[in-house]
Image: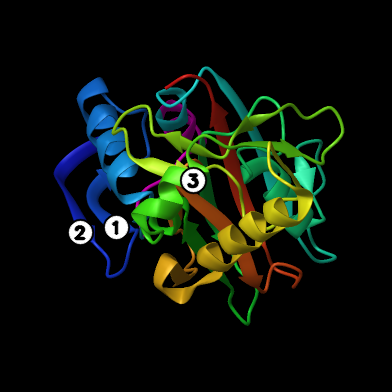
Amino acid sequence: MYAKSFSVHPLSGVLGAEVKGVDLSVPPPPALSASLAGSLSHYGVLFLRSVPVTAEGMEGLMRSFGAHRRSFLVTTGATSPRGGAECHHSEDCIALMTEPYGNKPSSRVALFHVEGLPSGGAESIWSSRAGAYDALSPAMRAYLDPLHLLPSAPGASRRPLVAAHPLTGRRHLVIGAHCEGQILGVPVEEGDLVLELARNLLSAPENQIRISWEPGMVALWDCRLAQHYAVGGYGEPGWRLRCICASGAN
């Protein structure tokens, strides 16, 4: 990957930016990886349209975000190719692989590359975990900051309800819109209200961005700052969606 005239153009709202002047046909040089990482930690999700892409370029990019990577191919329809790295239940696979606190090792950064689209198109929504936290009053932030969540998933361990991003220090909710679990140290009814408040904030239009997919489009997002939701079209025939998730300390 190389940059001819690398530039970042913020989108309206609380998250999202479009990146131009990037070639994903080869792995990135360190300077460009650092620039993309900085932009990602600031905007939460980056979109690249009509860029040259190869598997080598995407893997090289994701290698800069984490030592451990998982990749799979979402295909739908009778004409879908067969292979060991495929996932035919697209919504379930996407949710599992991109939810940062729903699996081990936890996803930190996710990449989607649209190789083929259903004839009717498809859309995705990203919700800002940081924007949801920013929408809270100072008093509510002070109340939530020391709390911990015990997810209902088997074998899950307790984790802070609020975390700081390791690069920017920006505070954000660690739970997702579909999180189930118990808030520790408070009555159950009170904890349920906290989870409901978080879900409502993540579902609020002012904390979201909605994007229509285009052939060849790439989306890259920080799973700690943004939560992906498949809006529509993911069960329709015609999908060929390359997905890569990276985990690690950086």
Q: CA distance from mark 3 to mark 1?
A: 32 Å
Q: Please state the horizontal and vertical placement of residue 104, each as a whole percent of the image.
A: 71, 27
Tell which circle, 2 or 3, labels the residue nearer the N-terminal end. Answer: 2
Residue that badge 1 annotates: 17
Q: What is the three-letter code of the residue carrying label 1? A: Ala
Q: Answer whether labels 2 and 1 touch (C-beta < 8 Å).
A: yes
Indicate yes or no whether the magenta region holds residue 51.
yes
Residue that badge 2 annotates: 9
On the picture, is 84 further left or further right than 38?
right
Q: Please state the horizontal and vertical placement of residue 115, each as a whole percent of the image.
A: 56, 56
Tell which circle, 3 or 1, labels the residue nearer the N-terminal end. Answer: 1
For label 3, the crowd category at 10 Å Cα-Cα, with few meaning under 14, some 14 to 19 and many 20 or more, is few
Quarter of the image containing the C terminus?
Answer: top left
In depth, the one of 126 and 217 nearer the eye is: 126
Secondary element at image label 1: strand
Residue that badge 3 annotates: 143
